[in-house]
Amino acid sequence: MQSQKVPAQLLELRDAIDSIDDELLTLLARRFEVTAKVGELKASQKLDSVDPVREQEKLERLRKQAKDKSLNSEFILELFQAIFDEVVKNHRSYLK
């Protein structure tokens, strides 16, 4: 089997992807820091971990933004639903 030389342009694009992935992880970490504060506040105020109205409004806004950016809105909704589910799980941990 012969090894192929990876074109420099491909390496540059991969570096750009790696940089974007780092940024995404940093943003997710920041988001979870803020939502942890929300969870603590909700627990201290005896509020429900889930706000279905807020969640639906947020998902609708994200769906529209995804469409405006020519992104697959179903994928974006699934991605954010996974994020929301993790947030709620974290919020519920404050109730123990």
Image (spheres, grey):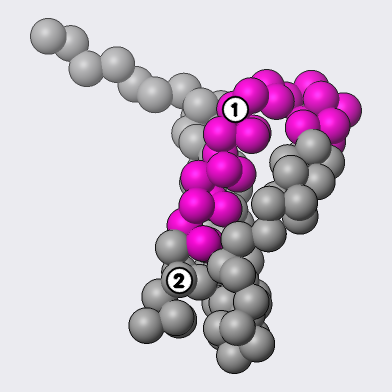
Q: Is residue 64 magenta?
A: yes
SS majority, magenta: helix
Q: Secondary structure at mark 2?
A: helix
Residue 53 in the image: state x and y as whole percent.
Answer: 76, 51
> In this rendering, would 78 be left or right of 55?
left
Q: Nearer the viewer, mark 1 or mark 2?
A: 2
Q: Image quadrant for the N terminus?
A: top left
83 magenta-colored = yes
Q: Does the residue at mark 1 contact the one at mark 2 (Cβ under 8 Å)? A: no
| Residue occupied by mark 2 | 92
Please give the name of the residue rendered at 39% of the width and 24% of the height, measured from the top-left corner.
6
Q: Residue at x 44, y 81 (%)?
A: 95
Instruction: Give the residue at mark 1.
Output: 75
* Residue 80 x %, y %: 60, 44
Q: Which residues are magenta?
A: 63-88
Towards the viewer: 77 or 50: 50
Q: Does dot 1 land on a helix, a strand or a loop? A: helix
Amino acid type at circle 2 is Arg
Q: Amino acid at mark 1?
A: Phe
- Tag count: 2
Horizontal and vertical percent position of residue 40: 57, 84
The image quarter in which residue 78 lies: top right
Q: Quadrant of the C terminus?
A: bottom left
